[in-house]
Image: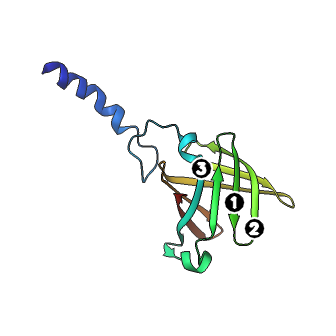
Amino acid sequence: MKFCKYFAFLLLPILVSCKKYPDGPSLSLQPKKWRLSGTWQVESFYVNTQDLTNAYFPNKVYFESYDANKKYEVNDAFNKQIGTWKFTNKREKLYRSASLFGTVALEVTILRLTSKELWYSYTDGTANYEMHLVQN
């Protein structure tokens, strides 16, 4: 019994410190690169905390795909963007870069990254954007 208490006492700080993103997950054994890999579809989109999903993506026709080779693709009803991605700031941010009539780059703050959900936010001028995507 004494061993169990000692083991739990040592394990507690490790479990508490495993939460990387504000909205979770608390603990994951799957590497972040593997969790990010796949095709994601928009679930909700907020501008300055206002839900504008239907205004920007009326049929939820917006997809982001990431692979383990650090390539990404964004598709919506009108455009297709292909480029590279990388984690930055100790894997708390995601940086995407593509060449489309010049370089198009975006760095987002990851809020949640599980095998089924990807949430991120970014600021452009005075507007704050938050995107919630689900694994497709």
Residue at 75% over, 63% down: 80
SS state under label 3: strand
Please tell me whether mark 3 or mark 2 is closer to you in this view. 3
Q: Are marks 3 and 2 in contact (CB under 8 Å)?
A: no
Name the residue at the bottom extreme.
55
Q: Mark 3 vs mark 2: which is more N-terminal? A: 3
Q: Which residue is mark 1?
A: 74
Q: Mark 3 vs mark 1: which is more N-terminal? A: 3
Q: Amino acid at mark 3?
A: Gly
Q: Are marks 3 and 1 in contact (CB under 8 Å)?
A: no
27 to 130, vertically: above or below: above
Name the residue at the right extreme.
101
Q: Amino acid at mark 1?
A: Val
Q: CA distance from mark 1 to mark 2?
A: 8 Å
Q: Which residue is mark 3?
A: 38
Residue sitting nearer the eye, 109 or 116: 116
Quadrant of res 88? top right
Q: Which residue is mark 2?
A: 79
